[in-house]
Image (cartoon, grey):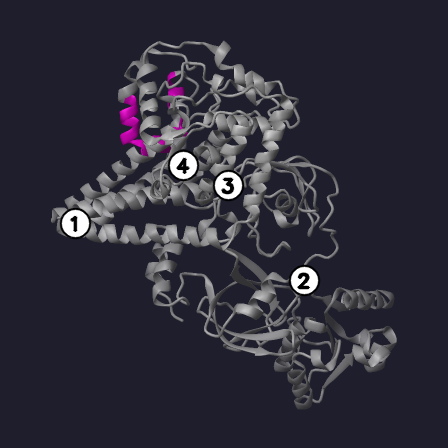
Amino acid sequence: MSAHNPVINRFVGNLIKEDWLDFMYSHVNPMLTVSRVMARVVSIKDETSDIKRFVLQPNRHWQSFQAGQFVSVKVMIDGSYTERCYSLVRSPSSELIEIGVKRIPDGKVSNWLHDNLQVDDVIELGDVGGNFVLPAQLTNKLLLIAGGSGVTPIVSLLTEALARQPKADIVVMYYVNSDKDLAFANEMKALSVKHSSVQFNVALATDGESGFFSKAQLTQVCPDLGERMTYLCGPQGLMNAVSRVWEDLGITEKLKQEVFGFAAVNLDAANTAMPIMLRRSQQELMNTKATILESAEAAGARPVYGCRMGVCKTCSCTKISGVVRDLVTGAIDDQPNTQIRICVSEPLSEVVLDI
Amino acid sequence: MNVYKKSRRLSSEEIEEFGAELDALRRETMGSLGKRESDYIYKVRNFVRYTEIAARSSLMLGWLPPFWLAGTALLGVSKIVENMELGHNVMHGQYDWMNDPSLRGSTYEWDTMCTADNWRQTHNFVHHTYTNVRGMDHDIGYGALRLFPEQKWEPRFIINPIGAAFLAVTFEWSLALQSLELEKLQTKEKTFAQVREEFKVMAVKMRKKILKDYVFFPALAGPMFLPVLAGNFTANIMRNIWTFSIIFCGHFTEDAETFPKEILENETRGQWYLRQLHGSSNLKGGKIFNFMTGNLSHQIEHHMFPDVPGVRYAELAVKVQEICDHYGQHYNTGSFTKQFSAVVKRIFKYALPVGGEIHGKANEAASATLDATPTVKRDLQYIPDRDAA
């Protein structure tokens, strides 16, 4: 969708507010914006009983991505924009983009997308991110391990690898509860038929022992797993079990994992009690949870947030004073007047924030 | 002028209970924010945008008196609502929970001379933290007026009424220049060089606003240059006088109190609420009045809950008043006429060297709140312009 010419663009931010122009444009077409990435829903399809596929047509501000990366989807729920990241399923060369969304019990965004989003609706997309991508040069043989809805970036990687090297030697191992839960299996099966170098395996939990991951089970399917560059995305249990095997084999450098959220931190407990002062909203509180954001919410404040996992910077705010630790990087920040992301920051001293 | 007779002296336990009740009210309200409030603020924003478009279009036909009058009045209304119900409230972070970057308190820039960054410092931080604390809250008289007997009389205050009228007409300029604290030049606490340096940031914003209202839109009107310019000028003056009146009614009415610096030492949450209550005053009025004042007609609730969306103040006021009644605390409210007359009376009265330093009585309530056991230490340091730099 074409927006306006670059001459207008130069005035934006200087003389005219961007949101004012977006407001004017929205009367013409909601896809028309100055810089925000908008996407129209082209189709919605049930993939399984709890996974839906959404095909989206982004506007001209959409920039490319790499196979295996995710995009943040912003939707307004109960008056507040809420973001979640979903892996991009289709190849980066495709004009349309696609996400597969599993309905999570009590999941705010996934339920909303399943229940409310309609064809022709326009939603906003945020940043593209993630390091779960193929190397620049595809020299190694690949092993792709998917578990449940973790299959979405795996499909993308498989498609991309074959687009680059039609004869790439790839083993796909897909763990899923039952054949009713198989998502994107037809696509992958079709690829394995078309490319004889691809070996596509499915393990169903309903089949008993052979349906669950174990070193023996995987070795049987893929005897040379130690030689392969391995990509893994799935539920935490599967990720832990696979990582342990790779650790035992001493080949962790060959394993790439996609982790949504930072599971290592216990969000419900604070390490040490520290006072947090929210200066603009005139509130003082103690940290009762692991992060400043969680503690502030527990105390009844409603700070801005986005991904809640240290990706999007929506919750970034000025720390006027105090020491905090970034739970993702472990970096300690004791400087005054710095920008911190409160969703992944833990206070190590009394902290004053400009919120 | 002992206003404290109207409130019962509370024990330190009572003060903390009072605070806890208000905290509970706040939590309950914050938890209930949702579609209702977000729909509301988008409506307000659209109102501002549509009225501005209509007003400026109407002014283009400014040679016809009805169009000029309608355009000017509507532009005045649009500017008032943008500053008060939209800008002021958004910049308090009242709608931060919506996660809409265009309504985020830390980045919103409003349509007035005062830069949003300076405002977040002088208003959101200094004024809301040190509400009506003498020597800390610069909003007491804006460094130009004497409004309370506790302020030391100086000969310059003789022209208080003229000063106030001037402040009213030029209010947006005064607010813009407020953070310069020009009165400190007189006392040599500041040098001209310092002021010039601080002024640079403001000048950028001022130039932008002047270009918009006095060059761009008049020029766009071509031969209607002068009517448009006059209309824009009048609309800005309208807003200045209105915002001045509403804001002065918020803290300088008859029963409003000021406090000595010592009150801040070891001030507890309950004491903080009490100070906000005694330093603020409400205006009674209908829905349209509330809307046009940016809900600052509920100044008490705004000071107790600066980050709760203003649209909720009216319903909060009922509960706050009940809590105040229960603890025997005076809840300062009245019609606009009553409260504004009291402000005018102050402006005239304290132009004269009356009142003087009558600390003893006036600080009775202050000392009452000081009796309580300290629990939370508050940063007493005043750090000017840290954000603005």
Point 73% across, 70% down: residue: A232
Point 36% across, 33% down: residue: B176
Q: Nearer the viewer, residue A142 or A353?
A: A353
Disc 3 marks a residue whose amino acid type is: Asp
Residue B25 pos. (x, y %): 56, 39
Category of crowding for the residue at label 1, using alpha-carbon neighbours closer than 10 angstroms: few (below 14), some (14–19), many (at least 20): some
Disc 2 marks a residue whose amino acid type is: Phe
Horizontal relation, residue A204 to residue B350: left or right? right
Q: Chain of mark 4?
A: B
Looking at the rendering, the stretch of residues picked out in magenta corresponds to B163-186
Magenta stretch contains residue B170: yes
Query: Marks 3 and 2, Cα distance to the nearest angstrom?
Result: 32 Å
Residue named by callout 3 = B307
Label 4: which secondary element: helix
Nearer to us of marks 4 and 3 is 4
Disc 4 marks a residue whose amino acid type is: Leu
For the image shown, how many numbered marks are present on the structure? 4
Q: For the residues labelled 1 and 4, say whether their Cβ atoms are less than 8 Å apart.
A: no
Query: Marks 1 and 4, Cα distance to the nearest angstrom?
Result: 31 Å
Q: Are marks 2 and 4 on the same chain?
A: no
Q: For the residues labelled 3 and 2, say whether their Cβ atoms are less than 8 Å apart.
A: no
Residue B49 pos. (x, y %): 33, 52
Q: Are marks 4 and 3 on the same chain?
A: yes
Residue named by callout 1 = B67
Q: Which quadrant does the N terminus of chain B fall into?
A: top left
The answer to which quarter of the image holds residue B234 is: top left
Residue named by callout 2 = A260
Q: Could you tell which of marks 4 and 3 lies nearer the N-terminus?
A: 4
